Amino acid sequence: MTKAEIQLVRALADKRGRTEHGLFVAEGEKLVGELRTSQLRVRKIFALEGVFEGPDVETVAPRDMERLSLLKTASNSLALVEIPRYDLDPATLGESLTLALDEVQNPGNLGTIIRLADWFGIGDIVCSEGTADCFNPKVVQATMGAILRVRVHYTDLPHVLRDAAAREVPVYGTFLEGENLYETQLTPGGIVVMGNEGRGVTPATAAAVTRKLYIPPYPADRRGSESLNVAMATGIVCAEFRRRS
């Protein structure tokens, strides 16, 4: 393992480095193993002795793995993976259930939402440009492999949503003044917008929402927490949409 390789891995901890090199980092035997059988292209694997074999694998000592790892506790393998490029067709967006994330900042939340999308069979997530990078190492680890199956797009979210609404695609969003999620009519397809952890949905994005939803507490008049974590709220909304479909 060379000094240049260590510097490369370190550079990929930052979005600028990932953009420059077109690579992201994935760690752990399970995730790296899934990557090797996925459609994503693995550039190189660093692994402890006996974990992986092949021409793309470089065996390293535990001490070197600790120097490479971007995690608090080093794993037994680390892969350099080419960042995939997905085409987004606005004309078909929302034909099946799609998630839209508006300025979601926390990597753990984003990773969990990608994992939820995978669980509920949602193939595409459309993000505002200000949403956290899905190839941030913390996000990749939090997806538990779902990043290999869910296509994440970054775009001008208000514009894309306005276009979808103009095509009469239902654009749902979660708001305190929305209709009760469990009592309102839901469609099999459409776009579900989830907002920032602290500020909710931005005004520009909210203007494109055509159906406002609200997750009620139980009982309805109970005074408790002011809000739900965005990943938790996403799971509740996705489960209700799928229950109805």
Image (cartoon, rainbow, N blue to C red):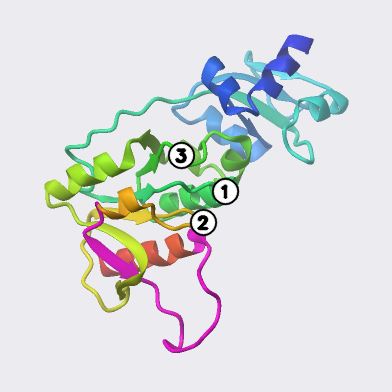
Residue 208 rendering spot, x and y as whole percentages:
24, 51
Would you identify the image quadrant in which residue 72 lies? top right
Residue 197 is marked as 2
Of the numbered discs 2 and 3, the one sitting upstream in the chain is 3
Q: Tell me which residue sits at (78%, 36%) in the image.
A: 74
Q: Tell me which residue sits at (42%, 67%) in the image.
A: 236
Chief secondary structure of the magenta span? loop
Residue 2 visible, this orientation: no
Picture layout, residue 132 above or below residue 37:
below
* Magenta range: 208-232
Contact between marks 2 and 1 (CB within 8 A): the answer is: yes
Q: Is residue 220 magenta?
A: yes
Mark 1 and mark 3: Cα distance apart in space: 11 Å
Residue 185 rendering spot, x and y as whole percentages:
21, 71
Secondary structure, mark 3, is: loop
> Label 3 amino acid?
Gly
Secondary structure, mark 2, is: loop
What residue is shown with label 1? Answer: 106
Picture layout, residue 186 above or below residue 139:
below
What residue is shown with label 3? Answer: 130
Would you identify the image quadrant in which residue 90 lies? top left
Residue 192 rendering spot, x and y as whole percentages:
32, 55
